[in-house]
Amino acid sequence: MPYNISWLVEKRVLYTHMYGYITAEELRSQKAVVEKFIAESEHLLHMINDAAETTGTDMGLRDLQNMQYANAANLGWAIYVNPNKLHRFFASVVTQLSGKRGREYATLEEGLRFLQDMDDTLPQLTMPIKSAS
């Protein structure tokens, strides 16, 4: 699973663009990278996980549950983007089980609008530039 991680808003909104087939091992590797970004954040940190271009996975619900960032006290909203209703449903279940704040959307535009509405301290959010997948 190739992925790109970058700040959408420096140290405030983390954007992850995922594409291709997702394995549990690759997701664990991604989690380690994201944890470094979390440590750099100086404020409430919102995360956007854009999985609209993923093609499948070998993970189960337990694997996804283990990927939560439960120890990070500065987490704000976690936004998951995927046009697949079933994937959004599973993301919702995992979020509810973790007790974190999260929302699932079919499009990135919807997720950005929600985040902008929920945190009025953020600057105007713009669509990220996606790397070639």
Image (cartoon, grey):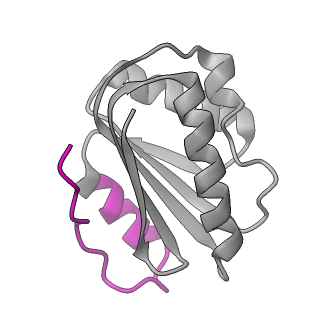
* Residue 18 position within the rendered picture, expressed as x and y whole percent measured from the top left: 36, 42
Looking at the image, how many numbered discs can be counted on the residues?
0
Residue drawn at 48 percent across, 65 percent down: 14
**Which quarter of the rendering shows the C terminus?**
top left
Q: Position of residue 105 (x, y in %)?
A: 34, 42
Q: Quadrant of residue 129?
A: bottom left
Magenta span: 110-133
Indicate whether 25 appears above or below 69. above
Q: Residue lying farthest left?
A: 132
Asked if residue 66 is positioned above or below residue 17 in the image, the reply reads above
Q: Tell me if residue 130 is in the magenta stretch.
A: yes
Residue lying at 51% horizontally and 59% vertically, measured from the top left: 47
Q: Residue at x 71, y 48 (%)?
A: 69
Rendered location of residue 91, percent (x, y): 51, 31
Comparing 103 with 37, the one in front is 37
Using the image, determine if residue 67 lies above or below residue 25: below
Left or right of residue 16: residue 29: right
Residue at 53% across / 76% down in the picture? 12
- Tell whether position 40 is magenta: no
Q: Position of residue 9 (x, y in %)?
A: 42, 78
Q: Quadrant of the N terminus?
A: top left
- Residue sitting nearer the eye, 98 or 71: 71
**Residue 46, quarter of the rendered image:** bottom right
The majority secondary structure of the magenta stretch comes to loop
